[in-house]
Image (cartoon, rainbow, N blue to C red):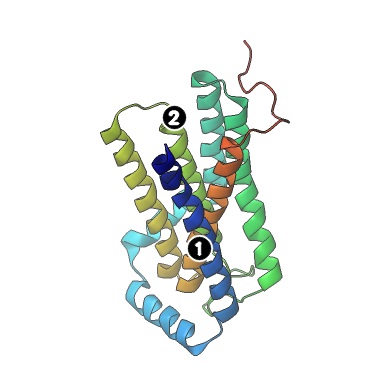
Amino acid sequence: MQRNKKINKMPYVLAVCSFVVFCILWGTYQTSFIQAFDSKASDLLFGNKFITMFHYIGETKFIFAVTIVLWIFILLRKKDLKLIVFVIFSVGGGYALYHLLKRIIERPRPDIVDQFSTYSFPSGHAVHGLLYLITIAYVLNRVITSKSASLIIWIMAILLAILIGLSRIAEARHFASDVIAGWLLGYSWFILSLWWLKSENPYCGNNKIKN
């Protein structure tokens, strides 16, 4: 039993480490090293049409539409109120968090024609794209018992989240450091949401929705 507890702690340790690295990127994105890294990543990915098209599944309207479908799925299959609140906390809370941080940090976006007027750090597509995809993967794996199907779902979620983030570099909407910071922040927020879900919350009452 003690071994299982140690294994279960690993995602939380990784979440803390991810947030620490996010803070380091926050404090160092203006350094020559990070700027050189951003420039090389832009040279490598800019204009890649295949990668660029994945930004559509990272758009806010699409994410919230899929989230509503996920709520309906939970209502029909699980009838679990706490799981629904978890999805709201993960996806909706993550959306509010990255918008708040953008306004605090105020990093300008890459200098291109017709650039967006909003701030750059962290990448909202990277944060939100990762959050909604791994939230979907987690919820589906509460229903699916097949280990192979579970593995496929997680691989697809992570791969799509990576492509969504890379699409922002390919379009020059974000620096690579914005995207990496977004992935780190998204993972940390997801694990925080997951910690809440697995905790004994006295305010949640009966988790099951009565018919």
The C terminus lies in quadrant: top right
Residue 205 pos. (x, y %): 70, 24
Quick check: 29 above or below 97?
Answer: below
Which residue is drawn at the image coordinates 57% and 43% (left, top)? 195
Q: Is residue 197 left or right of residue 49?
A: right
Estimate how packed mark 2 is, as few (under 14), some (14 to 19) or many (20 or more) residues with alpha carbons within 10 Å.
few
- The reply to whether residue 175 is visible in this rendering is no
Q: Is residue 15 left or right of residue 88?
A: left
Residue 54 pos. (x, y %): 40, 55
Mark 2, residue position:
142
Which residue is drawn at the image coordinates 34% and 26% (left, top)? 145
The disc, 1 or 2, on the residue closer to the chain's N-terminal end is 1
| Disc 1/disc 2 C-alpha distance (Å) | 26 Å
Quick check: 1 above or below 168?
Answer: above
Mark 1, residue position:
17
Which type of secondary structure does the marked residue at label 1 adopt? helix
Mark 2: amino acid: Arg
In this view, the residue farthest toward the front is 2
Q: In this figure, what is the number of numbered marks?
A: 2
In this view, the residue farthest toward the bottom is 32
